[in-house]
Image (cartoon, rainbow, N blue to C red):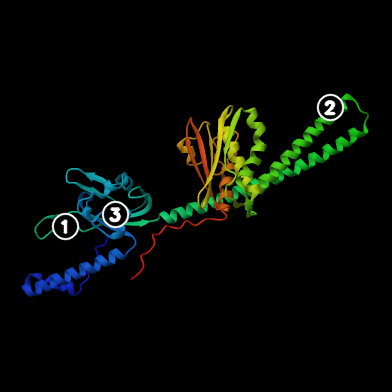
Amino acid sequence: MPAPRKRYGSLDRILGRIDDLDPANLAILVQRLAGERALLETVFNTIQEGVLVIGAGGVIEYSNMAANEIVGLRESDVGRAVFWKLVPGLAHSLGLHFDAGNDTCTAAPAITREVEITYPELRHVRLHLSRLDCEGTTPGGEIIQPRHVVILRDITEEKISTEDLLESERTNSILTLAAGVAHEIGNPLNSINIHLQLIQRRLEKAKATPNTERISESISVCATEIKRLDDIIHHFLEAIRPSHPDLQDIQLLGIIAEVFALLKTQCEDLDIRVTVSIGQDLPVISGDRNQLKQVFFNLMKNAMEAMGQGGRIDIAAEADDEYVHVRIADTGAGIDCDALSRIFEPFFTTKAGGHGLGMMVVVRILRAHGALIGIESVPGQGTTVSLQFPQKHRRIKLLRTEPREPVS
């Protein structure tokens, strides 16, 4: 590395003949040095990146305000705290080698890494470490230990924005693919339905026999199933297409009742008991009836599949001054922590035959309604899904104030 270029200013000229200064000029020099230090402190504390000077053994000799905030340092820690201990695994990540004998470390001349800091809060930081070539001896003969400068840049928001953009692009690609597949499935279904109608007409013209009656019944069953598949595709496309909700005054009790009517037979077949605790005076919300039916259908279907044979689904709703809260709890198998953290990811599913799009569709619809969703689960005990819908007519709670004394 080339030697640093020397700079000769007025301060350097004074320091060059410091031994010849009288007490008065020496006091002026100290004042100028204090002013230079204050200026540099102001400059470094204005910089948004964190700046650290690391001495022998990793001790932090200097830290600006940005670095204090990123790493969680106090002013009293400077001169005592060891930087490598503040971030676990950092020394290994940077390839630092410690000499226990003289309490020093060696590193490459310059290193840049992206690291994750969990204290004082989770942050993604781009760290650049550079070695200062200031080795030698002091006028007193003491060996000058090598130092390192560490530049820290908080890239948490940048990283989150990038991840959100990638996730949005991925989701849009999945929805486009799914819509295309569903549309292509609809074409052969229409063709099959047309040919079934032709067969049915020919049977009606043929002589009636027990065989023709059975064939006619089979055709009727096939036509019914094709109609059901066509309805599923139609609703699926409506659910995944990025369409704005048709907002109307909605009473959630009615939506839940309609969904339960669709699933009632399946619940009875699986011996699943459903309890609903919702008052008739629940405030209305602004929502799209069909989209919200899709939300509750998906959530109740998930609860039923998590329990299999037997179990209980509890549905409850209440309201405060601003929101309507709905809770759907089941006594199913529950979800472990790893799966719970990925439950809203496209194509992620815990079910053997699942496609992994149901919860993604639920979240998309809820976001369009300004609603929130939360999931709590205990493996072996069950899962609770909490929904929060903004009321159409929000009430403002006024603080009670004491009557003011008349001014005399």
Q: Which mark is residue 214?
A: 2
Q: Earlier in the sequence, mark 3 or mark 2?
A: 3
- Which residue is labeled 1 in the image? 136
State the separation of the CA atoms marked 1 and 2.
Answer: 102 Å
Q: Is residue 323 above or below residue 308?
A: below
State the separation of the CA atoms marked 3 and 1.
Answer: 17 Å
Most foreground residue, 9 or 49: 49
Residue 267 found in image quarter: top right
Q: Which image quarter is the N terminus in?
A: bottom left
Residue at (65%, 35%) from the top-left corner?
A: 263
Q: Amino acid at mark 1?
A: Gly
Q: Earlier in the sequence, mark 3 or mark 1?
A: 3
Q: Which mark is residue 109?
A: 3
Residue 58 image offset from top left, x and y in percent: 23, 50
Q: Amino acid at mark 3?
A: Pro
- Indicate left or right for 195 with 289 as reference: right
The answer to the question of whether label 3 and label 2 lie on touching residues, with beta carbons closer than 8 A, is no
Residue at (16%, 57%) from the top-left corner?
A: 136
- Indicate left or right for 292 with 386 as reference: right
Most foreground residue, 315 or 96: 315
